Image (cartoon, grey):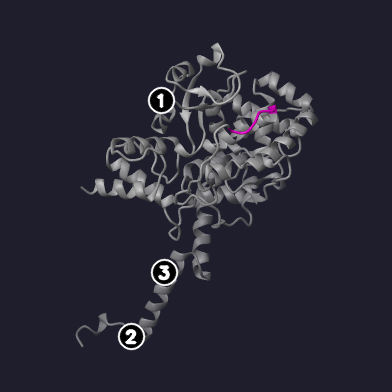
Amino acid sequence: MKNSAAMPSSGRCLDLLKAACLSFAIFAGGGTVANAASARDFHAFVESLWPDAKAQGITRKTFDAAFAGVEPDYSIPDLDLPSRPKVDNNGQAEFTKTAADYLSKDYLDKLAVQGRAFLTQHKAALERIEGLTGVDRYTLVAIWGRESAYGTYHASNDAIRMLATLAYTGKRKDKFREELLAALKMLQSGIPRSDMKSSWAGAVGLTQAMPTEYFKYATDGDGDGKIDLWRSVADALAFTARQLEGKGWVRGARWGYEVIAPPKADCSLEGPPDARPIGDWVRMGFTKASGPRFTAAQLKEDAYLMMPAGAYGPAFLAAQNFRVIRLYNTSDLYALFVGHLSDLIRGGGDFATPWKSFAQPKTQTVHGLQVRLKALGYPMDKIDGKIGSNTRKQIGIYQKANGLKIDCWPSDGVLAHASSKAER
């Protein structure tokens, strides 16, 4: 036959079938050969780090020892893998729990009791750190409680493995490449590999901070001439305080205030772009939910409206120190957790406005709404499936413009409405 050369033999067919199976195995991340191919790619990636590591003063001995036996961990969140959804916030409680669940009253009350005991136990160190940095002791104790449950939680992941995985196949490769190099510098500086235990995101130490922060803010908090963020409570607290100070902490100021909105206001006013002096919010009809009235100094502070559950929970005026806590961990709920816990440790009470019953939307619902609203001309700074202040705000503005109930909350109903409008 003229075309017989183009026709594979039965043996060739079998070879093609094997190749197809192998291709599928590689795509799915399974199988011995696929694992071998993946391992080669990972090791090539590791070797590509060497020039940058060498330029930062890391020796070949330290470099090779750091990566000896290290393989990627494909089980952790925030990875860009073919087998995973492009938008997936699993493993990040700040974006998968409702505000009411994340800010559990029972858990916060428990941490507050433990926090007051911790405050007494470490009074001298906390007073010294507060005097040096201006960061109040209550906020530091609250962060300690949130990050370590007052020493009962100990991260168990290998920081080098976590950071290498995220730098190799994470959604934010450049960021984690920088963190990985900083972690190697920590090893080069003499920190034992056994101390480099971390969260899945590579945060290390008693208060869980990223390696790049170590070289900016690590501080000898107990005066013993060395820095130990893994065993010295004073060093870890001082490190955290220096980070907050470096991010713009305002000495003597609060993180923010729970407020009651006037009848004519709604959640579409939320977000940093609408920040204004607290005095302006008061003139608009906002009042403190509890405690004494705003002082003259507080009325001059800039703050923005923050409603983490839209119309289904308390409202807050978030001031500069809230922004700083949010820079420590970029989540509204995290910053609110720390701020509220610090108030409870001081002796404050629960939120004045209760959380209403509401459902946490699916990540895909949030992502879909962000896409549709952007297509309709609403400014969406991020399309990430996360419910941030701008997403809530733009939903509220859309609802107001279209005569819908204004709750600033992602739902399948609002998504369907926006999808229908976008298709016209």
Q: Earlier in the sequence, mark 2 or mark 3?
A: 2
Q: Secondary structure at mark 2?
A: loop
Q: Is residue 36 above or below residue 403?
A: below
- The residue where tag 2 is placed is 9
- Viewer-proximal residue among 52 and 122: 122
Q: Earlier in the sequence, mark 1 or mark 3?
A: 3
Q: Residue furthest front?
A: 263
- The residue where tag 3 is placed is 23
- Label 1 neighbour load within 10 Å: few <14, some 14-19, many 20+: few
Marks 1 and 3: CB-CB under 8 Å? Answer: no
Q: Main secondary structure of the magenta part?
A: loop
Q: Earlier in the sequence, mark 1 or mark 2?
A: 2
Among the 4 quarters of the image, the one containing residue 137: top right
Among the 4 quarters of the image, the one containing residue 81: bottom left
- Viewer-proximal residue among 407 and 158: 407
The x and y percentages for residue 159 are 62, 47
1 vs 3, front mark: 1
The x and y percentages for residue 185 are 62, 39
Please state if 138 lies on the left or on the right of 48 as rendered: right
Residue 274 is marked as 1
Q: Residue at x 61, y 48 (%)?
A: 160
Q: Evaluate whether residue 49 shows in this view.
A: yes
Q: Considering the image in quadrants, where does the N terminus appear? A: bottom left
- Viewer-proximal residue among 113 and 203: 113
Q: CA distance from mark 1 to mark 2?
A: 71 Å
Q: Secondary structure at mark 3?
A: helix
Among the 4 quarters of the image, the one containing residue 17: bottom left
Q: CA distance from mark 1 to mark 3?
A: 52 Å
